[in-house]
Image (cartoon, helix red, strand yellow):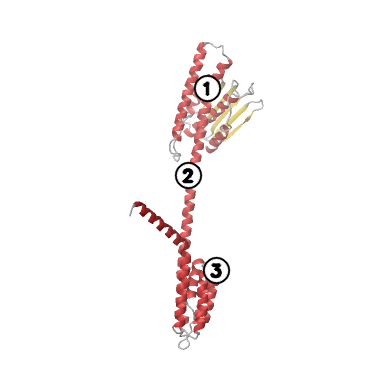
Amino acid sequence: MTCRDYADSMQRLRRWYAWFVRHAPRFRDLMYVGFSLLTIVLQAAGGNPGWHPDWMVFALGAIASLALWWRRKYPVLVTVMAVVAMGVAGIFMPIGLALLTLAIRRRDLVLAVLTFAAYVAYVIGNRPASGDPTVPIFTGPFVIGTWVAIGAYIGARRDLMVSLRDRAERAESERELRAEQARLGERARIAQEMHDVLAHKVSLIALHAGGLEVNPAVGPEKVESTAGLIRETARQAMEDLREVLGVLRTDLSQSGAELAPVPRAADLARLVEASRAAGVQVTSSLTLPDEVPALVGRTVYRVVQEALTNVHKHARGVTTEVLVKGAPGTGVNVRVTNVRPVAADSLLPGSGAGLVGLRERVTLSGGRLDAGPTQDGGWRVEAWLPW
């Protein structure tokens, strides 16, 4: 036999097995009906020790046996028919198979009532024509109870397997959902980090380039200095972008991985100085101790960075005030205020996600953020963080 013949034979075997599994319940129904009919024929042909005529045993037994074909769809009705056949003609096998099916499918008051009715029918239908009539009273609970107990065990086991399967599928779905939420959360974190890191440096580059554009008559020394600042800022932006993209290429499920660079509160002075070098009139008051927690310091840095980035985009050249102060126990207050800009146009388009992400960052840190226009037409970003 070649490999192809073996593969074909295995494929045919799998198709036959799938067909058998699909039709196995009907095969079992057919076996139950045939086995029950066989016992009825043997009971009718072998001489009935009771008081029932043979024609009655065969007729009612055939009806009760054929009714087993519908035992899955109408278990209660089939059981009632078997109880009647048992009480009238002393036919045992249909009622046993019917009670087995009923106990598999339901274990409630209906099963209890029909079990008691089957016991009464067993006592009535099996009373001997001569001899001790009390024998069925004592044997009935064991005979009827055995069928019911076997069916209840099979039904409880099936229910348990279904419950475990549903629980496993639900746990798998929840695990996939949590993994997907973790991936989406990580991507949102990286996107926010890229916005915070790159938007500020790109706005600085635009400010430097805009200064040369509006004042082309500056001397070569100023042009060289500004070009150097543009080159250095662009290099830093490329390095930051490379580091953030490096995290994107790794496993996003490692949500604990920090995105570099990680700013600190000590970098605030350098951040403000970079805006001054780009031509923004910034006055600052930074009275924050060095022992500020890393999370609080990073959030403070991001608040000031996003506020200055918006100044670069929408209010370049205006006077801006940066105020940062805080102490343990009282928290950290951050306020960035700029006056009303003269020009209404924006140097760079805004994505609208900066303040939204900033508010989420501050809220997760346990603080609050307020941003809006001032009375004189300027803009204020104010935050408080717990310490």
Q: Is residue 348 left or right of residue 39?
A: right
Can residue 178 be spotted in the picture?
yes
Q: Residues within 10 Å of mark 1 (few under 14, many from 20)?
A: many
Q: Residue at x 48, y 42 (%)?
A: 182
Location of residue 202 with respect to 159 vertically, above or below: above
Residue bearing mark 1: 205
| Label 3 secondary element | loop
Quadrant showing the N terminus: bottom left
Please report whichever mark, 1 or 3, sits nearer to the chain's N-terminal start.
3
Q: How many marks?
A: 3
Q: Quadrant of residue 15?
A: bottom left
Q: Secondary structure at mark 2?
A: helix
Residue at which label 2 appears: 179
Q: Residue 142 at x, y = what percent?
A: 44, 76
**Amino acid under disc 3:** Tyr
Going from the N terminus, do you reach mark 2 or mark 1 first? 2
Pointer 3 residue: 74
Amino acid carrying mark 2 in the image: Ala
Gap in angstroms between the C-alphas marked 2 and 1: 38 Å
Q: Amino acid at mark 1?
A: Ile
For the residue carrying disc 2, how many other residues have a C-alpha within 10 Å: few (<14), some (14-19), or many (20+)? Answer: some
Distance in Å between CA atoms under marks 1 and 3: 80 Å
Foreground of the two, 172 or 65: 65
Mark before the other along the chain sequence, 3 or 2: 3
Q: CA distance from mark 3 to mark 2?
A: 45 Å
**Secondary-structure class at tag 1:** helix
Query: How far from the left and from the top, in percent, is residue 240?
Result: 46, 28
Position of 77 relative to 326 (above/below): below
Q: Residue at x 49, y 52 (%)?
A: 170
